[in-house]
Image: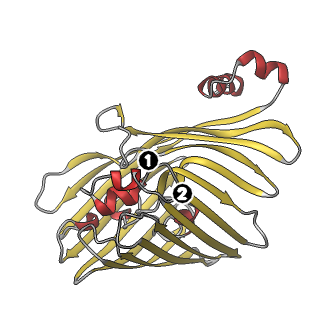
Amino acid sequence: MNKNVLSLLVAGAMTVPMAAQAEMNFDVDADLYGSIRAGVNDFSGEDAEFTDELSRLGVKGEVDMGLDDVKGIFHYEGRLRVDTGEFAGSGEDNARLAYAGAKGSWGTVQGGRMWLPGAIWTHLMAGGGFNDVQINDSHNVHHRMPNAITYISPNLGGLQASASAVLGGSGGRIGDSIFGTVDSSNFDDNDENMDIYAVALQYNIGGFHVGATRTSTKLDDYEGDYDVNTVAATYKFDSGISLGGLYQDESNDTGQGSFEDVEIYNGSVQYAYKDTSVRAMYTHQDVDDAENNRVSLGVQQIFGKTRLWLEYADVDSDNGLKYSLASSDLISLGFRVDF
């Protein structure tokens, strides 16, 4: 897309007067991007179906604020549905990104709906590289949060830290995914300044990455907090082999919801040769007294900005539909185009 045209569109969407922007002569560097993802899924005992694999369309960029060592940043991303040809709704399962902020050598501050850095540094790093939504999904309740304010430190020799707060009577994905039918007014009536806080660290050196994060609710109407602690590590060898591992502990002391404790173990291996890769992943969950196990296998071929995948998962679950792990076999054939 023509950069000047896109800059005008972005400025209009942000309700910045065109004339004022031209008079101040501040530069806007914006990128329009998207990812169209479609698949055919075949669950054991069910008919094969055409599925949307979380397609999305977004715009992101930087703006000159006229200050030394400070750039304004913005990012908006909405979900598309290739199965129905519609923009998806705004619920927690569909809402994606919408935030603005500033960055410099001192770090980054941003507010809105965003990926919390700890989720990027753990789950998204150690997710095994699978494409299908069902296979790639783990209990990542602390991923995209609304009403969040985040500070991310500069990279200091491979080490970074972040701190986030979720405000405004919002439980985000924790509220929807964990408490389910619990009245959301528990968040609205919270007397604490923060409904949720999260802190995270990551360290990168060579092909090694390690990340850790803690996310916790702060709700005065509950017996205790809901805490999620995650640590993950990956290592990429020069040979094209990549290893990944993740451990997550969830402790529900609120007296609400259908469980108290969850532990997740995840291990993965990938091998890439040129544009072809194969991967395998094992996921184990202990949910109170129940166990869930999943073995996943996949192969992917990249053609420029497109990719074709074939993935398989075998799931053995003691507790039915919790966390998208129902006992079943799944075969996914999918195609993705990025721009």
**Residue 72 in which image quadrant:** top right
Q: Is residue 243 visible?
A: no
- Residue at horizontal 49 percent and vertical 68 percent from the top: 215
- The reply, left or right, for residue 112 in relation to residue 46 is right
Q: Residues within 10 Å of mark 2 (few under 14, many from 20)?
A: few
Q: Which residue is mark 2?
A: 193
Amino acid marked by disc 1? Arg
* Camera-nearest label, 1 or 2: 2
**Residue 227 in which image quadrant:** bottom left
Residue most extreme to the right = 68
- Vertical relation: 56 (above or below) 151: above
- The reply, left or right, for residue 300 in relation to residue 274 is left
**Residue 136 in which image quadrant:** bottom left
Amino acid marked by disc 2? Asn
Q: Which residue is mark 1?
A: 336
The picture places residue 107, in percent across and down from the top left corner, at 75, 58
Q: Secondary structure at mark 2?
A: loop
